[in-house]
Image (cartoon, grey):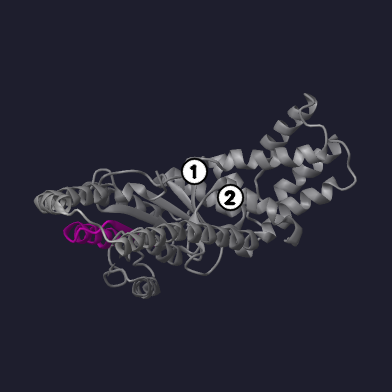
């Protein structure tokens, strides 16, 4: 199943039912046409050539979407590779510098790697795990030289980041996504980009302006709603955030909307009253829909480095985030924080943002990310 397939399940069932009804209505017509064809004893040669030509054209057309998809994926990978060049320069470029002139793996090299990973915002705990695993492999003669070590480190990062991260599956509609995070992390723009992605999957989307503590937040979400072409449920600034989101859920149910994406106040993870507001929102949604919210996405700014890990710990303990949206990877060398978040907190990264464009938010793929990280090393600038 694909990343978004859960949302299509009911629609596919409905499409199948409609197809069956259509086929039943037209079965008699098909039978009559079949009888008419059986009575015909001659076929036009020109007609045969025309059918052959049409068949060839259809085959060519059927190949186009596949080729276009390959080009699209290649373009996204290229943008990702370019966007994370600073992080690549810090981590992979740093590794290359350490390995220069080294023919074997000694303790000095491992200590330099340890310092590199810590300063790359992977976190002390995660760094120690990686280094100890490498040290063990070296002692057992599994790894013998820096070239083998580099390959092993690449696979180690892929292993850490390869946590199941598909969206929670359900048959409920609407599908409720609660978006949380501190101000400045890119929450509002991420919501707009998410809405666009769901629309591209042929789903109807509604936004809920739940950040009622900041007047500008409501206006910003309205603007994004207009750009993407989705309705926004709102109340005046200062209104009860839970009430706004509850209204959105009821409205979506009555209008058969597929997905509701709810904004929440940009809160500091240290503010107890604001965290309690999030818990209230969860309770209100749960009362109307027992299995909702289906996703609680925490938007984190990659440029904040280890502070993003602290935020994730607080949100996870208070409200139980189901996944992370890591933004602003294009403007920092601190992208290594993604490794620490997944390893320490066991929270999957579900989406990554690597640019300001509407196309620059995508479902996270661990192998693709690490391939881009290592593939960008030659053009990366090894600077903070």
Task: Say which quarter of the image contains residue 342.
Answer: top right
Q: Please state if 302 lies on the left or on the right of 214 as rendered.
A: right
Magenta part of the chain: 241-265
The reply to whether the magenta stretch includes residue 264 is: yes
Q: Which residue is mark 1?
A: 347
Res. 308 visible in picture: yes
Vertical position of residue 364 compared to residue 301: above or below: above
The residue lying at 71 percent from left, 46 percent from top is: 117
Rendering coords of residue 323 (x, y %): 45, 48
Rendering coords of residue 239 (x, y %): 28, 67
Res. 263 visible in picture: no
Rendering coords of residue 201 (x, y %): 36, 58
Q: Which residue is mark 2?
A: 368
Quadrant location of the N terminus?
Answer: top left
Quadrant location of the C terminus?
Answer: bottom right
Q: How many marks?
A: 2
């Amino acid at each position: 199943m694909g990343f978004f397939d859960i949302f299509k399940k009911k629609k596919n069932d409905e499409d199948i039912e409609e197809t069956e009804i259509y086929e039943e209505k037209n079965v008699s017509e098909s039978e009559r046409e079949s009888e008419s064809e059986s009575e015909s004893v001659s076929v036009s040669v020109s007609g045969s050539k025309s059918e052959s030509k049409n068949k060839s054209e259809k085959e060519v057309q059927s190949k186009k979407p596949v080729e276009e998809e390959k080009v699209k994926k290649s373009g996204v990978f290229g943008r990702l590779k370019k966007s994370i060049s600073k992080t690549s320069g810090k981590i992979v470029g740093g590794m290359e510098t350490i390995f220069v002139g080294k023919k074997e793996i000694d303790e000095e090299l491992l200590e330099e790697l340890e310092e590199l990973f810590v300063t790359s915002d992977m976190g002390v705990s995660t760094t120690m795990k990686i280094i100890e695993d490498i040290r063990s492999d070296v002692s057992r003669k599994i790894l013998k030289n820096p070239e083998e070590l580099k390959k092993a480190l690449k696979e180690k990062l892929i292993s850490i980041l390869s946590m199941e991260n598909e969206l929670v599956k359900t048959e409920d509609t609407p599908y409720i996504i609660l978006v949380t995070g501190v101000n400045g992390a890119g929450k509002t723009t991420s919501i707009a980009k998410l809405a666009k992605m769901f629309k591209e999957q042929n789903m109807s989307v509604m936004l809920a302006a739940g950040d009622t503590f900041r007047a500008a937040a409501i206006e910003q979400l309205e603007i994004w709603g207009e750009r993407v072409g989705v309705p926004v449920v709102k109340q005046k600034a200062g209104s009860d955030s839970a009430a706004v989101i509850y209204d959105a859920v009821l409205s979506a149910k009555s209008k058969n909307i597929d997905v509701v994406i709810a904004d929440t106040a940009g809160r500091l993870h240290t503010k107890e009253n604001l965290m309690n507001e999030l818990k209230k929102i969860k309770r209100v949604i749960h009362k109307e829909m027992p299995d909702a919210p289906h996703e609680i996405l925490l938007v984190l700014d990659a440029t904040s480095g280890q502070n993003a890990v602290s935020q994730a710990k607080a949100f996870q303990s208070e409200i139980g985030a189901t996944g992370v949206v890591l933004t602003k990877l294009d403007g920092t060398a601190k992208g290594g924080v993604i490794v620490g978040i997944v390893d320490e907190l066991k929270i999957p990264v579900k989406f990554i943002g690597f640019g300001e464009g509407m196309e620059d938010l995508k479902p996270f793929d661990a192998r693709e990310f690490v391939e881009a990280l290592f593939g960008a090393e030659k053009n990366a600038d090894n600077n903070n």
